[in-house]
Image (tube, rainbow, N blue to C red):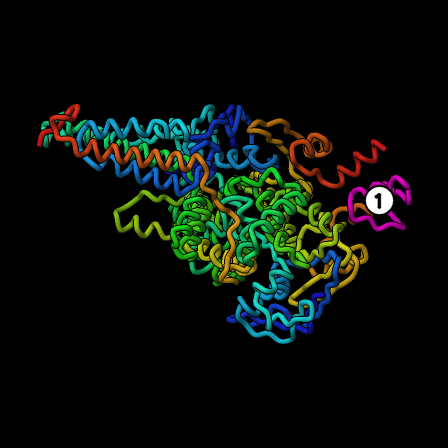
Amino acid sequence: MLDPMGMVEIFRTQVGETSYSKLNPLTKLILFASFIALPLISASLLMQIFSLMAQTPLIILSRSERRVKRSLKASLLFIVVLVVLNYLTTHSLEFSLAMVLRLVSMIIASAIFMTGTSPAEIGDLLTKLKVPLQITFSFVIALRFIPVLADDVVMIITSQVSRGYELERGSFLEKVRRLIPILIPMIIIAIRRGHQLAEALETKAFGATEKRSNYVVYDYGRGDWILLVYAIIVITVGLMVGTLTPQFQLLPFQY
Amino acid sequence: MIEVEEVTFKYEGSGINALRDVSLELERGKIYGIVGPNGSGKSTLLRLLNGLIPHFYRGEMKGRVLVDGVDTREASVAQLSKKVGLVFQNPEHMFFSETVYEEVSFGPKSIGMDPEEIRESVKWALEEVGLWELRERSPWSLSGGEMKRLSIACVLSMKPEFLAVDEPTIGQDSLSKESLLEIFKRMKGEGKGVVIVTHDLEWLDDLGPDLVFVLRYGVVIGGGDPRKIFSDIRNLATNGLIPPYRYIVDSLLEVG
Amino acid sequence: MLKIEDVTFRYEGSKRPALSEVSLEIDRGEFLLIAGLSGSGKSTLLRLLNGLIPHFYRGEMKGKVLVDGVDTREASVAQLSKKVGLVFQNPDNQIVTLRVDREIAFGLENLGLPRDEIVGRIDEVLKKLGIEHLRKRSTAELSGGEKQLVAIASVLAMKPDVIVLDEPTSELDPFSSARIAKVLGNLNREGVTVVVAEHRLDLFAPKANRMIVISNGRIVREGHPRELLYRGDISLHGVRPPSVVKLARKYGVVGAQPLAVGELIVALRRGVRIDRS
C-alpha cells in the first residue's frame, strides 16, 4: 500500500520564517554539529540532561516543537527497544536512561536543523564549503526531482494496477519479475525528464562561464554571532562536565 | 450501473475532504462529463470508480460505491478493472512492452482471460482505436496521439463495460482530439458507459455528453443536461472553467 | 533579426528529415504563431533558433540559421541564450531550483551577472508577469500554470531579443492557458518578439500578427492568422480553425474576420449580417 500524498509531504521544502531559519546556514550547521557532538562527550546522565536543556532555546527559536514531537513519536519504538536492550545487558537503569536521552538529544538536534534549513540552503552551504558545483548542483537537482519522480511512481503503479496488475502475488522470483511493468516506465520516464532537463540547462547557459555569480548571499548578523558564542559556551561547559570525576556527577554511571 | 452513494473521502495526511457527500449514478450506453477546476476532486472521483480508492490510496472513506451491485470495498482493483477501465492522463506511465500488441495483451493476461479470448479482444481493441496496423511497433515509437489511443486500447482489451478517462485532450493536437471524439462516441454506441473528466469544455461540447457534473471543492455543485450546464457561463467562469465558445456568444448576444 | 536559410535537418538515427528546405525570417516586434500537428517539425524549427540544433542534437544539417547576422554554428548555445530564450512544453522538466526567485536567478548566475543586476532583473520580471506573490514560493508547490509562468520569467530575465515557446500550454488547463496567452500578448505589446508553437489557436491566433503552418517538415502556409484561418484549406494540414471562426461562418459574418470572442460579439452586434440558422 502506498500513500502518495504522504510521500510527497516528506519532500515539502517550504521552510517557515523563524528567527532560527533566518540564521546563516553556516551557523545552523555549527549548532547542529555542536549538539550532535555534545551528548557524545560523555555517557553520563548529567551530560545528557545538560545537552537536552541547552537545546531548549533552539527549539523555541525555531518553533520546531511539533516536528520534535513527531520525530520522537516516530522513533518511540526504537527508543523503547534501546532501553530494554541496554537494561538487559548492563542492568543499569541510569546508563539505559542516559543512552536514551543521548538519542533523544540527537533526534532533537536533527529535527531543529531539518525544520529550519531548506535544502537549497544546504546546497549553498556545500558550495561555501568548496564542494564542486557539479556535486552541489546534483544535490539540488535530486531534491527538485524527487517529488516529481515520486508522483511518476504513483501514477505508474496506479496505471498498472488499473490494468489488473497485482504486485503482491506469487513467489519471490515471481515478484521480482512482476516489478518489470513498474521499473521500465520509471526508467524511461526518468531518462526523458533528464534529457529535457539537459536541454533546459543548455538554454540557460549552465556551465557557460567559470565565474558563476551568486544571487543568494548570506550575511553574518548579530543573531549568528550570539548563537556562535552560545555554541562555544555550551561545548566548553560540556567538556568541563565531561571531565568531572564520576563522584561529582549528579547521577553517575560507575564503570 | 455504477452507484456512488454519499461518498466523502479524505486522503491520509490531508486536512480537507477531497470529496464531500458525492452521489452519482452512471449507466451503460451514456457519456458523462465531469468538469471542475484543478483540485476540485475530479481525479479522486475517477479513482473511486475502479476501487483505487480505497484499496490503493489510503484515507478516510464514508459512503460506498457499487459497481453492478458489488461494493468496491469487497472486490479487488483487478476484479473491478473487468467492469471499469481507467485511462490515465499520461500514457507514458504504462508502457513497458516491446510491441504494441504485447502492451495491449498485458491487461487481459493479468485478469486471467484464456488465450483465445485474449487474441480476439486485443485485435478488437486495437482496431477500435485504429492501431491494428501498428501492432508490431514499439509503444515508445508512436506519436503522442497514437500513444493516447494505445493507452485506451490497453484498457479496452480487458472488455470493461465502463471507460473512465482522465483529461484525454491534454497535450493532444486537433487531429488527435477529433479521433478521440470518434472513439468515445463509438464506445457509447456499443453500449459502454463513458466517463470523461476534463477541463476542455469546448471539446466536451463536441463530444455531446448525455450528462455533465460540475465539481468544486469536492462537492457536486451542478449536474444535468449539458445545454443547461454550459449556458450558465457565469457559474462556469467563477469555477475556473471556460465555457464552450458558442454558449459564450449566445449568452452575450442575449444580454446585448 | 532571425533568419533561417533553406535548412534541412535530419536527426541522427532517423530516416526522414524533420525539416525540409525551410526558410523563414523573423523581425523585431513580431508575434509569430507556428501551427501544425504533433510531429510536423515545429519543435525542430524552434530548436534551430537557439542553436540547440546543431549543438545539442546530432544530425545532418544543410542550410544555415543567422541570429543577428551570426551563424548559430559559430556561436555556443550559451552565447545565443542572450539573444534567443526558449521555453519548453513541460514546466516540470525545465525548472531546476527549489525556489521561484532562485529559479529566475539561475540563468543570470550562469552568465556571471553581478548580484545587484540579478536582484533588479528578478524584481522587474516578476512585476512584468504579475507573479510577485510567488517570489519566495517553493517551485515544487506551484500549479502547472504558475510553473510555466516562472519558466517564462526565468527565460525573460536573461533579456533575450526573442522569446520562443514550444507548446507552452499543452500540459495546462484552459484557464491557465488563457493566462499564458494574455501574458505573451502583453509582452509583445511592450516590444518583446514572441515566437510560439501552439495547438490552441483559439487563444493565440488573436494575439499573433503572423502565422505559419508546418506540415511534414515544410512550411506550407504563411500569412496573417485572419487570412489563413478564414481560408478553408488549412484543414488539409490537420490544423483546425478555432471555434470563433466556425461560429462566425455559422452566423454568416461578412466584412469582418473575428478571431477573438470579443471581436465576434462586436461583429454580430454591429449586425454585419446575422443569419441565425
Q: Position of residue A3 (x, y in %)?
A: 40, 36
Residue interval drawn in magenta: C250-277
Q: Position of residue B222 (x, y in %)?
A: 64, 28
Instruction: Assign the N terminus of chain C to one quadrant of the image.
Output: bottom right
| Residue occupying the far bottom of the picture | C62
In this rendering, would B43 be left or right of A253? right
Task: Kindly identify the amino acid type of the residue bearing the numbered disc 1.
Answer: Tyr
Query: Tag 1: Cα neighbours inside 10 Å, few (<14), some, or many (≥20)?
Result: some
Identify whether A213 is placed above or below C16.
above
Instruction: Assign the C terminus of chain C to one quadrant of the image.
Output: top right
Would you identify the image quadrant in which residue C274 lies?
top right
Identify the residue at horizontal 29%, vertical 50% (top origin). Answer: A174
Q: Position of residue B94 (x, y in %)?
A: 46, 50
Identify whether A152 is placed above or below A80.
below
Residue C261 located within the stretch drawn in magenta:
yes
Residue position marked by numbered label 1 in the rendering: C251
Q: Nearer the viewer, residue C45 or C246?
A: C45
Q: Position of residue A137 (x, y in %)?
A: 44, 53
Q: Nearer the viewer, residue C149 or B246?
A: C149
Determine the secondary structure under disc 1. Answer: loop
In this rendering, would A250 be left or right of B122? left
